[in-house]
Each structure stands twice: as C-alpha cells, then as structure tokens.
Amino acid sequence: MQSKTIDLYEYFCCDRREAQAGKLLVYVHEKCRYKGIRRRRPAILILPGGGYHGLTPYETEPVALYYFQKGFNAFVLRYDVLPHTYPYPLEQAAMAMMYIRRTAEETDTLENCVAAVGFSAGGHLLGCISVLPDDHAVRNVFGEEWEKVRPDASVYCYAVVYDDHAENKPNDSIDNFCNGAVGREKYQYDAKVNAKCSPAFIWTTGNDRAVPVDNSVRLYQAYMSAGVPAELHIFKEGIHGLSVCSSEIQPELKYNELLVHVGKWLELSVEFLFSCGLKMEIDKIG
C-alpha cells in the first residue's frame, strides 16, 4: 500500500480563504508490472458523517481499508465543518473527485470508474456532488469541467436527504451545511435527481432515529422516477452510524447477529459497484 495526505488547495493552487480542511488521505495499491500485465483499479472516495459539526472517525479509514482489500484505490476526504461550511465542503468534495481522476495514470486508477460512499451528513455531501455537480461552488473552481465531479456510482449510507425540522429530530445537517450562506431548499437534493445521475446503492436501518428511514426511501424513489439504476436495502434494526458494523470500531457495540446481518451492506455494495462496471482491468504492456 502507498499512503499519503494531499492538501487539495495546494494541489489545485486555489485560494484557501477561510477553509481549514480540504485534506485527502490516499490509500492506493502498489503498481503491478508483472509478466507483461498492468492492473488498473476502480477508486472510491469516502465521505464520513458527523452532522457538519465534526467527522466521525469510524467512517474514515476502516471504510477505506475494506474497499482497499476488495481491490479499490481508496481516498478519504477530511472536509470542513462548522463554522466553515458552504461552500467549503462542496468545493473540497469536488476537488477530491477531480484529484482522483487527474492522477489516475500515476495511481493505475481507471479514470471513469470512480465511486463515492457517504455516511449520514457525508451522504448529504455525496448527494450534492452526485445530483448537483453544477453548483456554483463547483463551477467556481472547475468551470465547465464540473461534470467530472459527479461520481460514476454513489453509495448512500443512512444519508441525510431532507430535513423537515420534525419534533424530537436531532439532526439538522442541511442547516449546518448551508450555514445561512445559501437557501436550504436546493440542498434537499432528492427533488433534483435526474436522468444524468449515476447509479446509486442506498442502505439504512428501519429504526434509525437520527436520520429517519424516509430519507433513503425518498431518495430511492427519486432515482427510480428519473430512470436511474438504484438499489435500496432497509435492514430491520440498527442504530444510526453503524459504519462497517464492527465492535472494534465502536466498542460500545457488542458483536452479535445484528451487526453481522447489517454488515452485509459492505459486500452488497461491492457487488453493486462491480455490476456497474467498476472493477479491475488487466492490460498487456511491453
């Protein structure tokens, strides 16, 4: 494995302004040049959750290492949270996608096989680059190249899609994202899903009290209405934020049949990505 941290603002020679984060953790496979072949791999960008208050650690490297061992080059974005939200998280997610595509040759990544996975508020950020890649925050950095920001497939994990300010609902991620700089209506993105969107894998649990299951159901229905391939998995039970469903990641969770069952989302998501063509290719060289 080759690992390093990239400052995206330095890489793209962009003015940082008030941005504090914008760092990309890179986990790529060693280049393989053996018996006249080269392995080129799909990639995946990981967007952890945290309600735009912080970043949840068990939705970062543990996720990257899972997809890495499944053959993906993996990238974890450390994006800005309050008080430095819009436009910073969105432009940083856009820069991460563009970095993966622009460095594809040197990392043996398949340039058009770049997925992204987002958790909770990170799922909201995923929705922004998947459904709204032409947002002003993206165009301001990449102009007419904005279409390259959209992932080639999206994996939504108990993602924030809308926020109706329901009573006893602790999550207010969309307000945190907008932070008074932009109107929240645009960033409840399920209404903006269209035929140009890439395939989506969506999962959640039926009794998630932080991000109600309706978020995932509405998102799936939006993809179906737009004619975009999508898959929805609603597990019967499970608290919010299960990530890779490991008691080693969250010590308060006891290893049990529930974690084993919900943890199947990982393999299911890989199967889905493979079915969308995001899998390793072997080229002859020399």
Image (cartoon, grey):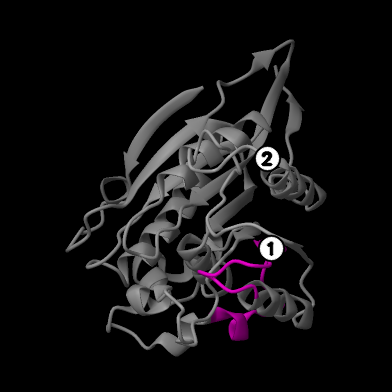
Q: Which residue was labeled with disc 2? A: 256
Q: For residue 174, what is the image quadrant? A: bottom left
| Dot 2 crowding, Cα within 10 Å, few <14, some 14–19, many 20+ | few
The location of residue 184, given as percent across then percent down, is 41, 86
Q: Is residue 173 visible?
A: yes
Q: Is 200 a magenta residue? A: yes
Above or below 36: residue 25: below
Nearest to the observer: residue 70 or residue 202: 202
Left or right for 79, reference 150: left
The location of residue 212, given as percent across then percent down, is 59, 74
Left or right for 47, reference 131: left
Prevailing secondary structure class for the magenta stretch in the rendered image:
loop
- Residue drawn at point x = 22 percent, y = 68 percent: 83
- Residue drawn at point x = 34 percent, y = 40 percent: 6
Q: What's the residue type where badge 2 is placed?
A: Asn
Q: What's the residue type where badge 1 is placed?
A: Ile
Q: Is residue 104 visible?
A: no
Q: Callout 2: helix, strand or loop?
A: loop
Q: Which residue was labeled with disc 1? A: 202
Above or below 285: residue 139: below
Above or below 218: residue 42: above
* Quadrant into which the C terminus falls: top right
Q: Which mark is residue 86?
A: none
